[in-house]
């Protein structure tokens, strides 16, 4: 049986994403995103699922930076999942949830619930942990502490907690994009792939030099070929202030003509070009047999 690593502990959104993408894999939790990615390189798991981007908070920088600078792998598949955050407490604190002194969760989850926390728990201390599931686990293991966790209903079931307040995230269209990372470049195989499945190709581009119009020339290489870009993002190269590389998501599968021609043109301009992956993209509803409500019941 194949093994997939995910940001744990059990009950996390990332575990649910892993179950949806590779349901037959044995799921192995890790305490941090770097640990999860390292596990693939160290042979502890065959592949890993990590959060890459949130609709509210943007890119998960630790994922992107660790991927680029430390553990380069192949981006093999993507799933975009809806995210609903709840306030979880021990059963004994259900009637006094609004008096908790500390709220534990992942930094992104806390940021996604900013308005709720300001309105209902303005005096509570906010404490960051590695994942929402880790926050729920902490509450279970420290029941004596007057505290709550922000996490999902999967974690509530996994750790015997009660949902004191449902859907406390500030925006309803909260979704997170998860990526499946592998050591090899073999195409991802899934029964969910069909003729309607959309694909994405991700490139990393460094400019030849900092001169006027450099980025425009890069984008023109895609534009005149009528290639649609779904995202472009700059990240520091960590070699000096003002030095950046660009991560570009192309809304198409890597072919033998257009994308290679773009790469050749950019290289001719003096740019550095690397293809990080070309992969199928699924929504939560795309994965036949793994609807959200089924995953939530089974992810324990």
Image (spheres, rainbow, N blue to C red):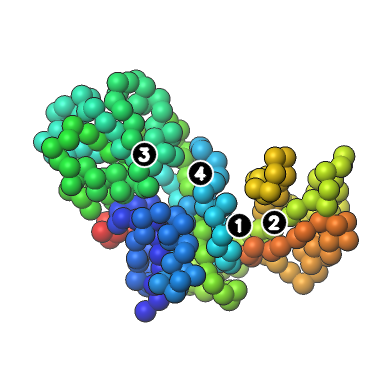
Q: Residues within 10 Å of mark 3 (few under 14, many from 20)?
A: some
Q: Is residue 265 left or right of residue 194?
A: right
Percent coordinates x, y for residue 178 in the rendering: 49, 55
- Residue found farthest to the front: 240
Do tag 3 and tag 4 residues touch (Cβ < 8 Å)?
A: no
Figure quadrant of the N terminus: bottom left
Give residue 199's quadrant in the image.
Answer: bottom right
Q: Is residue 115 above or below residue 82?
A: above
First reached walking from the N terminus: tag 3 or tag 4: 4
Residue shown at the point (50%, 44%) measured from the top left:
54
Do tag 1 and tag 2 residues touch (Cβ < 8 Å)?
A: yes
Q: How far apart are labels 4 and 2 at the CA level?
A: 20 Å
Do tag 1 and tag 4 residues touch (Cβ < 8 Å)?
A: no
Q: How far apart are labels 3 and 4 at the CA level?
A: 17 Å
* Residue at image mark 1: 68
Q: Nearer the viewer, mark 1 or mark 4?
A: 1
Compare residues 292 and 150 and report the one nearer the observer.
150
Q: Is residue 185 left or right of residue 260?
A: left
First reached walking from the N terminus: tag 3 or tag 2: 3
Q: Nearer the viewer, mark 3 or mark 4?
A: 3
Q: How far apart are labels 3 and 2 at the CA level?
A: 31 Å
Compare residues 271 and 17 and report the one nearer the observer.
271
First reached walking from the N terminus: tag 1 or tag 2: 1
* Residue at image mark 3: 128
- Check residue 54 in the rendering and tell me which mark sits there, or answer none: 4
Q: Is residue 253 above or below residue 283?
A: below
What secondary structure is marked by label 3?
strand
What secondary structure is marked by label 4?
strand
Percent coordinates x, y for residue 70 in the rendering: 56, 60
């Amino acid at each position: 049986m194949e093994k997939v690593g995910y940001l744990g502990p059990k009950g996390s959104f990332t575990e649910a994403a892993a179950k949806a993408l590779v349901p037959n894999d044995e799921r192995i939790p890790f305490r941090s995103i770097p640990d999860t990615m390292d596990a693939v390189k160290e042979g502890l798991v065959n592949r890993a699922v990590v959060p890459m981007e949130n609709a509210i908070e943007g890119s998960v920088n630790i994922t992107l930076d660790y991927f680029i600078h430390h553990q380069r792998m192949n981006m093999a598949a993507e799933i975009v999942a809806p995210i609903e955050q709840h306030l979880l407490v021990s059963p004994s604190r259900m009637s006094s949830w609004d008096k908790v002194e500390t709220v534990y969760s992942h930094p992104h989850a806390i940021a996604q619930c900013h308005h709720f926390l300001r309105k209902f728990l303005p005096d509570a201390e906010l404490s960051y942990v590695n994942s929402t599931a880790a926050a729920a686990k902490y509450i279970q293991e420290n029941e004596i502490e007057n505290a709550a966790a922000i996490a999902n209903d999967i974690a509530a079931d996994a750790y015997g907690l009660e949902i004191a307040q449902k859907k406390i995230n500030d925006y309803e269209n909260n979704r997170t994009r998860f990526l499946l990372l592998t050591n090899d470049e073999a195409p991802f195989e899934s029964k969910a792939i069909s003729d309607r499945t959309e694909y994405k190709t991700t490139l990393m581009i460094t400019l030849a030099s900092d001169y006027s119009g450099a980025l425009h020339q890069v984008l023109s290489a895609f534009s005149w070929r009528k290639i649609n870009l779904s995202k472009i993002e700059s990240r520091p190269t960590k070699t000096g202030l003002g030095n950046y590389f660009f991560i570009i998501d192309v809304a198409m599968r890597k072919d033998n003509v257009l994308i290679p021609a773009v790469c050749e043109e950019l290289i001719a301009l003096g740019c550095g070009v690397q293809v990080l992956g070309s992969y199928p993209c699924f929504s939560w509803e795309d994965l036949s047999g793994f609807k959200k409500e089924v995953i939530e019941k089974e992810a324990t």
